[in-house]
Amino acid sequence: MKIGHWTVPGKRRSTNEDSLYLNPDLGLFIVADGMGGHNAGEVASRTAVEVTATSVREGLKAGKEAEQVVREAIAIANKSIFEKSLNNPAWEEMGTTLLVALIVDHEVTIGHVGDSRAYIIRQSQIELLTDDHTFVFEWLKEGLITREQARTHHQRHGLTEALGVTDDVESEVCLWPWDDNVCLLLCSDGLTDMLEDDEILAIVETSSEPEQACSTLVTAAKGKGGKDDITVILVCN
């Protein structure tokens, strides 16, 4: 596998509330986009990736199936963040998105909560693998608004699910084939708010290496405003 990654704060922020994690030997890649005041977003996203990584490592060592490992890791991370928020008033109601990709053999297991996204890029096409857990995405699926309206809707960041906000969370976990000549893109909404899917595809397709692609994606998103923190992981097989 060839791997690139990049994370930068948005132009309106002094700190980066996104977190990422890469462990190619384990086949584990994570993106989290935190929310909350008083550095709570940063705490939530960092906790999410650290707890998830530890849980996945232990689950695989115990011989559990990848899907079970990812589901349990998300639940454990949720509980850890929620308990931290109860014990520190400054972290009250903190939360984060969480996007987990675990590649085992010829299959990738993707688990997510929130609106960080996973895409598959192959044969000059880009396919979204995750549904945003937002009110606007639900309205889009129901046909109540158009895709163009969804991109600029004032409630597009209103999450229907987030990690750590309550003591229980409803995650989505799906399995996809991991074939040759395929790239997996994980990103926070700081990228997808600024770039259309076809713009993302064009940059990945014309980049010589995943690291160059990630750098160019971040630069392009910042060039279009870069309002939020931007995090990208690109894994190519």
Image (spheres, grey):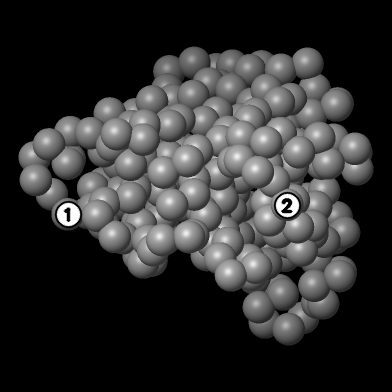
Left/right of residue 10 with respect to residue 95 in the rendered view: right
Nearer-N-terminus badge (1/2)? 1
Find the distance from the CA under tag 1 to the CA under tag 2: 36 Å
Residue 49 position within the rendered picture, expressed as x and y whole percent measured from the top left: 43, 31
Give, as a three-letter code, the residue at label 1.
Glu
Instruction: Check disc 2: other Cα within 10 Å, few if <14, some if 14-19, many if 20+.
Output: few
State the residue position of label 1: 65
What residue is at 74 percent from the left and 42 percent from the top? 217
What residue is at 74 percent from the left and 25 percent from the top? 9
Answer whether labels 1 and 2 touch (C-beta < 8 Å).
no
**Residue 157 higher or lower than 57, as above or below:** below
The disc at residue 154 is none
The disc at residue 206 is 2
Residue 174 position within the rendered picture, expressed as x and y whole percent measured from the top left: 38, 64
Q: Residue furthest front?
A: 208
Q: Quadrant of residue 63?
A: top left
Left/right of residue 78 with respect to residue 65 in the rendered view: right
